[in-house]
Image (tube, rainbow, N blue to C red):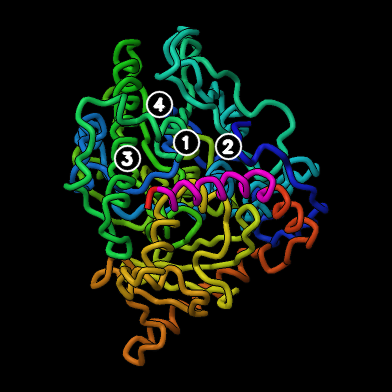
Amino acid sequence: MNMKPGRESAAPHRHLTLAVSAVVALAVVATACGGLPPDGEDEPERPNILWIIAEDLGPELGVYGHPAVETPNLDRLAADGVRYTRAFTTAPVCSTSRSAFMTGMYQTTIGAHNHRSHRDDGYTLPAGVRVITDWLREAGYLTANLVDLAGDANETYFRGTGKTDWNFQYDGEPFDTDRWSDLAGAEPFYAQVNFPETHRGAEWDGAHEQITRPADPDAVWMPPYYPDHPEARADWAQYLNAVMSLDRKVGFVLDTLERDGLADRTLVVFMGDHGRAMVRGKQWPYDSGLHVPLIVRWPAAIPAPAGFEPGRVDDQLIAAIDLTATTLAIAGAGPPDGMQGRVFLGAQAGAPREYLFGGRDRGDETVDRIRTVRDVRYRYLRNYFPDRGLLQTNRYKEFTYPMIPLMRELDAEGQLTPLQARLLAPTRSAEELYDLEADPYETVNLAADPAHADVRARLRAALEGWIDESNDQGRVPEAPEIHEYWERQMQQNYDARIDAMLEARRQRR
């Protein structure tokens, strides 16, 4: 399992006994036969399926209209496929989000809602809930989490990470292979390839060396809650460099599909595992932490579903768990009754969602609980710890996000705008409501505005209904010893490094 620096150890957990709602406990155990044709009809040809998953990536791509970034390979994928503009994960951090979209279930329903939890306590998925590869293998698919893409042990750049990072124990091997070379002789296949460029770390730091035209810090656009400062601009530019390095790898995969004669029979999906690794992005369930790119290209040799047109832009609301259900439907393997993801493409597609739901819970040593609901225009959030600021201590972010110490320094000097300074406030509102048409960066909280009282009441009721119906396990706090463990771990891993980093900053200033 691919773990990040500073997070190698697993925390002790008391075993969580889930009272999974009856709809999940009873219905998910049904066999995944919903995608099979009626007796007497020919079974449709089933495509290969490839998920390309980028870490920590919002829709900051050229094809989504973001400036100062060039993504020609993703541009051509979108030109040949459908680009979805309102795709969102159900959690804003990797382990919880991946636990959800790999099962088609909300992380809060299956007890996988706390970041990097259940690594050594024997906790398994609730009865009837399975990872997508279990369903697909039963349907005759080879499954792969690709690492070796080039068949060359000396190739270090064009490689996948093999990341899983699930908040539950899996008995056995969830994938059949990690080698691209195994795919051509074993169709149909389901494969995923995970790329790390947009996750802060070595690939992020060196991304500008992998591209021909790095982003110009003076030309980048940033949300207004970030300071217009050279260090902030340089950090955003490096994010865009990471996006462009990622685009190179996407191009390599698309070209390899063509080279091996697989492109015309392979459905290609490109997505992010959650939003960008920036302040108020990753680990925060605003649009900036949940909104991801989603592009789907249908294989040319297989009849496309009704309404699928290359180059089309689709604005329907899509949850990442819907990709799980849709993949199973396309593969003729379901989805099983009770899966919380919904089919959005193909013959089994239902009506578009009215609402999307999500949330965050403990991340490392940072204890929090936020739940959120979004419709096509508004986002509502409920903060269960309003006495704690947005930037309550999280040592991983304090060390790896240069924007945080920069903003603290500028705040001490009185150089932040009121909007920017609000990120550093010691408390926050219990409720937040944003009009995303008028305020796409979610900066004006309308929760106390009488003119929006009806909207707030509607979304609050929808969120409370979802919490109950989905049997949100976050209503049960983790044991205190878990929090104590993570506090010790993060102190050991980061305190000395943070002190050294801050001293270096003081010397520079």
Residues at circles 2 and 1 in contact by the CB criterion of under 8 Å: yes
Residue sitting farthest toward the right: 14
Kindly identify which residue carries mark 1.
201
Q: Residue at x 25, y 69 (%)?
A: 437
Indicate which label's residue lies in the foreground, 2 or 3. 3
Question: Which mark is first along the chain, 3 or 2?
Answer: 2
Q: Which mark is residue 4?
A: 2
Residue 498, percent from left and from top:
55, 49
Question: Which mark is first along the chain, 1 or 4?
Answer: 4
| Element type where label 4 sits in the image | loop
Q: CA distance from mark 4 to mark 1?
A: 35 Å
Is 503 part of what is drawn in magenta? yes
Looking at this view, is 410 or 357 the one in front? 410
In the image, the segment drawn in magenta is 490-507
| Element type where label 2 sits in the image | loop
Kindly identify which residue carries mark 4.
47
Residue 290 visible in the picture:
no
Q: Quadrant of residue 330?
A: top left
Q: CA distance from mark 2 to mark 3?
A: 20 Å
Kindly identify which residue carries mark 3.
238
Question: Which mark is first along the chain, 2 or 4?
Answer: 2
Q: Residue at x 34, y 44 (%)?
A: 294
Looking at this view, is 322 or 420 the one in front? 420
Query: In the picture provided, is 280 more to the left or to the right than 165?
Result: left
Query: In the picture provided, is 191 more to the left or to the right than 27?
Result: left
Give above or below for 168 relative to 378. above
Q: CA distance from mark 4 to mark 2?
A: 34 Å
